[in-house]
Image: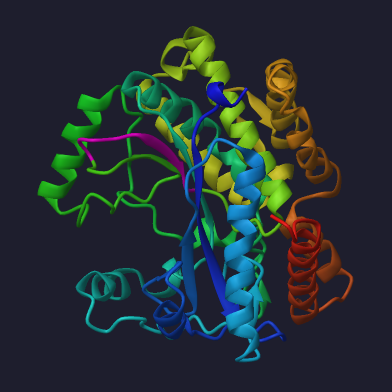
Amino acid sequence: MTNLMLLKGFEVELFTGTFAGKNVGVATAITEDLSDFVKEPDQRNLEYITVPDQRYSVLKHALLLPRQKLRKWLDCKQLTILPGSTLSLGNTKIFERSDSENSYHSFIEKNYGTSVVTASIHINLGIENLALLFSALRLIRCEASLFLALSASSPFLEGNSTGVHSQRWVQFPKTPSKVPIFLDHEHYVTWVEEQLDQGNMQNERHLWTSVRPNGPERPHILNRLELRICDLVTNADLLLAITALLELRIMNLKNNLKKYDPIHASSKTQEELALLADENDLIAAKSSLDANLSHWKNGKQINCRDWIKELVLDVTPLAKELDMFELLQPIEAVLTKGNQSMVWLNSYSKGVSIQSLLQQGISEMIREETSFIQMNSTY
């Protein structure tokens, strides 16, 4: 089974703060002591990156062990890791620089402010065949809204409910504002060079879209797909389920390009597909699983939950063949009970405070880590 599977890795952005849910920035101090972590421009959050692996059992260790290491450091300061993808109880008026000498950080602060101060999960899947990579980018760009809906965890900002399920994706500046459906590697390289020449991108990394190609020397040397749209998913089993769905979707694509590549299988033009995908992303950010989206095959309306069920059903034969079906089960629970934002908003509507909800989320994270360590004490 493993030989058929893709390499997978995660970029995990986290907020730090008090056990009462207030954001507190300590990234500069953390990165001085813990080499596994890197700073973001605002020091209220930081990031760790997992080593790519094909095996989901190894990926779970890779996700949870850095969190445990960070928690031990934070415990000494009476701080913790916060759930959620926005400054739920934080101050959005002030940008807390983590590195005053970094010119790129200066650019970020000046042009975007705290709209970029978010926490998220970037899922990377290794695809070295460039033709397959750009086919996968097209498919996942058109279905990225579904992965956002499963992961949504940012309904609060600065002590208030925002009225949307992913405030992070609503506020995050998509850059450049219009990104085409790339036809192939040459199209991507030409487009990136044009954006750099026109000043729409400051560097090769400055492509902030739902999904993008990645590699050691962008835009020329690429080896992976990076899904960037997901909110922070603190439950490792759910994150692995989302990743498994993504991987199985790409495997199905590889086996039948004409059925799954939107360039071949959609009645929409390249330009129409880009517009449809971007609109779906924003609709899903607002209503997530309850959203009515436009299907990339024909533009017809489809409920987000129903579309995800279709995807799960579609990948089920392959999942069973590869012994991955159990990995998908947490998705069923989300479809039934709602994602993190929906669960929080339901409790909030009944009078539970944002502070209490964050405290519950902190406790759930700690319980997951403790249970994992106890079960894997000999690992």
Q: Is residue 245 magenta?
A: no
Image quadrant where one finds the C terminus: bottom right
Image quadrant where one finds the N terminus: top right
Q: Where are the magenta residues, as a range?
A: 219-228
Dominant secondary structure of the residues highlighted in magenta in the image: loop
Q: In the figure, 129 relative to 70: above or below? A: above
Residue drawn at point x = 48 percent, y = 85 percent:
26
Q: Quadrant of residue 2?
A: top right
| Residue 257: image location, x then y, percent | 47, 11
In this view of the protein, can residue 296 be seen by the observer? Answer: no
Q: In the figure, 111 relative to 177: above or below? A: below
| Residue 243: image location, x then y, percent | 61, 39
Residue drawn at point x = 74 percent, y = 36 percent:
327
Q: Quadrant of residue 163?
A: bottom right
In the shown orientation, is residue 187 left or right of residue 231?
A: left
In this view of the protein, can residue 237 be seen by the observer? Answer: yes
Q: Nearer the viewer, residue 320 or 108?
A: 320
Q: Which colouring convention does the figure follow?
A: rainbow
| Residue 226: image location, x then y, percent | 43, 42
Q: Quadrant of residue 344?
A: bottom right
Of all residues shown, which one is farthest toward the right?
Answer: 350
User: Total label count?
Assistant: 0
Q: Nearer the viewer, residue 345 or 67?
A: 67
| Residue 36: image location, x then y, percent | 46, 67
Residue drawn at point x = 22 percent, y = 43 percent:
217
Q: In the figure, 341 relative to 220: above or below? A: below
